[in-house]
Amino acid sequence: MKTLSFDLFWSMRSPYCCLALDRVIEIQRSYNVEINLRVIYPIAIRDPDFFKVRASRHYRPYLLMDTARLAEFYGIPFRRPIPDPVVQDLSTSIISDEQPYIYSLTRLAALASEKGRGLDFLNQVARLLWDGRTDDWLQGEHLANAIGRAGLDYDEMMAQVSTENGRIDAMIFANQEVQTAVGHGGVPLMVFDNEAFFRQDRIDLLLWRMKENCLTERAQK
């Protein structure tokens, strides 16, 4: 039986990634397919001038409206994280030089992927950030409990993020280079057989293409 695979490029700050999560997990559950999670830093970190210089003035208002609309359409509990993983002055679009959250959060996701628990991590930690049920996701045991539910050891993960940050960043930067080579910088980005499918509204198209290439359903227990 042939098992297909595709790369999934993911940012822990992207609302569109969060809104794609259920359907990505359903693909893994229902079909014989391997999903290679490739975590990258968000555009605000990769290109701090993006929101201030390159993004249209309509970018953020539309994003806020569109993500709320999509969440309502799909019935997904959704609210922007508190605190935002990226420290940014929204009145000026300036990205702070001090970023206490996004580096460790992204490294944790990349490390989970390396351990073969990438989607389990997203299923717990991305929901913790985005489903609106938890304020101050960094406080108390929220993050530790979410990582534990993903089948990972929080203390071990945090120790590795602290002592192996250079190695983990090298993995993240390599993912970013692969994404650039594919020809797209957005997320979520799915790449199957060198063909890119950008954003959550191309998941059905991705699935159609894989079915053209003999994607088979997983036997259900």
Image (cartoon, grey):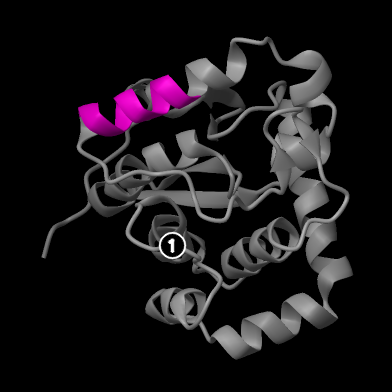
| Residue 191 seen in this snapshot | yes
* Residue closest to the eye, 114 or 21: 21
Left/right of residue 98 with respect to residue 28 in the rendered view: right
Left/right of residue 34 with respect to residue 97 in the rendered view: left
Left/right of residue 107 with respect to residue 74 in the rendered view: right
- Magenta highlight on residue 67: yes
Query: Residue 100's spot in the image, x, y percent?
Result: 75, 63
Q: Is residue 100 above or below residue 10?
A: below
| Residue 207 seen in this snapshot | no
The extreme front residue here reads 91
Mark 1 residue element: loop
* Residue closest to the eye, 149 or 198: 149
Span colored in magenta: 64-73
Quarter of the rendering containing residue 105: bottom right
Q: How many marks?
A: 1
Quadrant of image for the C terminus: bottom left
Magenta highlight: main SS: helix
Residue drawn at x 67%, y 58% is 106
Query: Residue 53's spot in the image, x, y percent?
Result: 83, 17
What amino acid type is highlighted by mark number 1?
A: Asp
Query: Residue 87's spot in the image, x, y percent?
Result: 72, 48
Residue drawn at x 46%, y 56% is 129
Residue drawn at x 32%, y 59% is 133
Give the residue number, with chain letter if any, for mark 1.
135
Q: Residues within 10 Å of mark 1 (few under 14, many from 20)?
A: some
Quarter of the rendering containing residue 56: top right
Residue drawn at x 42%, y 29% is 200
Left/right of residue 158 with respect to residue 199 in the rendered view: right
Query: Residue 122's spot in the image, x, y percent?
Result: 46, 58
- Magenta highlight on residue 170: no
